[in-house]
Image (cartoon, grey):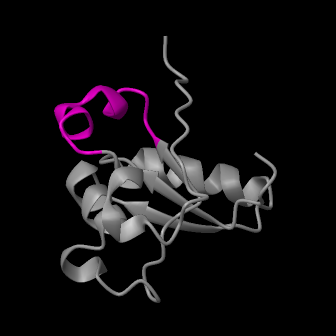
Amino acid sequence: MSAAVRRILVVDDARLDIELALDAFRELQLTAKVDVALGGREALDRLAGAGRFVDRVQFPLPDLVLLEPQDARHRWVRGAPPVQDDARHAAHPDRGAQFVDGGS
């Protein structure tokens, strides 16, 4: 992937883990905007533009989604349709999904 990551969505339900991730990003002096979703339902709503996340100017799609490895195995991820297959995201053909499993 050669495109720069401008926006990252961190998904976790543990506030301490979120703070650790944000501290690491600050230490690395990332220039990307970092958004946080407190759990899977909020992440899916944000990615789908549902509920309070309907405004794409205020809540644009992220370039990268970071999930805790344990969270990636939860039912809410497995049971959800892939976001890139959703017709609402057809205007973003360059945005595919790439999964990196940091767990064992």
Q: Is residue 97 left or right of residue 44?
A: right
> Could you say where residue 22 lies in the image, as x and y percent from the top left?
58, 57
Residue at 34 percent of width and 70 percent of height: 88
| Residue 30, above or below 68 | below
Per the rendered image, the range of residues in magenta is 67-81
- Residue placed most toward the observer, 85 or 6: 85
Q: Is residue 59 left or right of residue 82?
A: right
> Could you say where residue 19 lies in the image, as x and y percent from the top left?
50, 54
Residue at 18 percent of width and 36 percent of height: 79
Residue at 56 percent of width and 56 percent of height: 95
Q: What is the quadrant of the N terminus in the image?
A: top right
> Could you say where residue 74 lies in the image, as x and y percent from the top left?
23, 31
- Residue placed most toward the observer, 70 or 20: 70
Residue at 35 percent of width and 87 percent of height: 55
Indicate yes or no whether the magenta region holds residue 8: no
Residue 15 visible within the image: no
